[in-house]
Image (cartoon, helix red, strand yellow):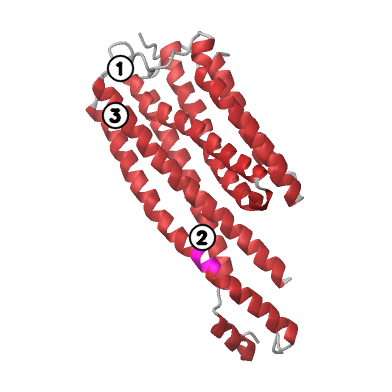
Amino acid sequence: MTQGQGPEHKALQKHLSQRAPQLETLLRAARRDRWILLVAAVALAMGWAAGLFWVGADTDQGEVYRIIYVHVPVAWNSFLWVMVGAAFASWGLARRERLPSMDLSSQAALEVGTVFAALSLVTGMIWGRPTWGVWWDWDPRLVSTLVMFLVCMGYHLLRSFTPDARARRVVAAGVALLAALNVPIVYYSVNIWRSIHQPQTFSRSQTAASSDVVATLFFNVFAMIVLGYALYRVRRGGLSLSSALEQARQDRG
Amino acid sequence: MADYGNLSWHVYLWAAYLVTGVGLGGFAWRSLRRRTEDAAALESEGFLQAPQATKQGDMGERS
């Protein structure tokens, strides 16, 4: 039996074919993202090689201090992507007609931020054991980072448990803003409540590190930001594609 | 001074880099795979057909 000879089917085919260029643009962008991801991975590999083999050991901590070249970049990236997610969420709330698009951007940024927050906690624990003698301590920096991570996880859980798209977008934007409120608390916690975690290594008045350590660390931070951006683009493109696929399937019935 | 317990400093150092590499690599791989699957679905389900191809489909290709 030949399908779709009726006028309704022809109208539907026309509608879907009008969407084709838009979908092909999404696919072209997806192919470009692989190159950004590759460049970021190469930059990060160079940064890690410098941190592991080029810079000298620390006088107090010895070789284990080299964890700084992964821990600090992932921690700063967690702040960055949670803030970016919240910025998209606020934009969507301020301009409701842009909310569906901003919601996808916010979701992608917060997924990247959550991964970085989890890695920040894990690498911090791995560094904490040899330097503090414990894997975990109820220290303000650690607890505030854990709270930020849990709020991010709550964001994703809430999304999956809210079937209504409009309600999901608004509630998710609210939780994204709540996650971002934690960022300054995490960042300044070491100055406000002094405890086991070391204070900020870099401040406006002084820097407690040598120039080669600073250069290597900032190169790694830069490479990790590029990688974070690549991951964000991959996820944003992926969310656009799955949203387009879902919409196209709904259009088809 | 650092207290490494029963483990060498190598274990902590490499574990931190390994966890970060696996975590970020895994996230990238999973994201790319999901996107590739969605792109393949768009193509295989005929949503990327150009108008001419759609017309051919109407003429019997989708029978």
Residue appearing at x 53%, y 50% in the figure = A235
- Taking the magenta stretch, the answer to whether it contains residue A23 is yes
Among numbered discs 3 and 1, the one appearing first in the sequence: 1
Say which element carries label 1: loop
Q: Is residue A201 above or below residue A225?
A: above
- Residue of label 3: A216
What's under tag 2, amino acid-wise? Thr
Residue A107 in which image quadrant:
top right
Counting labels gives 3
**How many residues crowd mark 3 within 10 Å: few (<14), some (14–19), many (20+)?**
many
Q: Magenta region: which residues?
A: A22-26
- Residue of label 2: B36
Nearest-to-viewer mark from 2 and 1: 1
- Residue of label 1: A209
Q: Position of residue A128 (x, y in %)?
A: 45, 17
Horizontal arrangement in the rendering, residue A238 relative to residue A163 (left or right): left
Residue B39 in which image quadrant:
bottom right
What's under tag 3, amino acid-wise? Thr
**Separation of marks 3 and 1 at Cα, in angstroms:** 11 Å
From this viewpoint, is residue A43 visible? yes
**How many residues crowd mark 1 within 10 Å: few (<14), some (14–19), many (20+)?**
few
Horizontal arrangement in the rendering, residue B50 relative to residue A11 (left or right): left
Q: Is residue A185 above or below residue A39?
A: above
Magenta-highlighted stretch: main secondary structure? Answer: helix
Horizontal arrangement in the rendering, residue A183 relative to residue A228 (left or right): right
What's under tag 1, amino acid-wise? Ala
Horizontal arrangement in the rendering, residue A77 relative to residue A108 (left or right): left
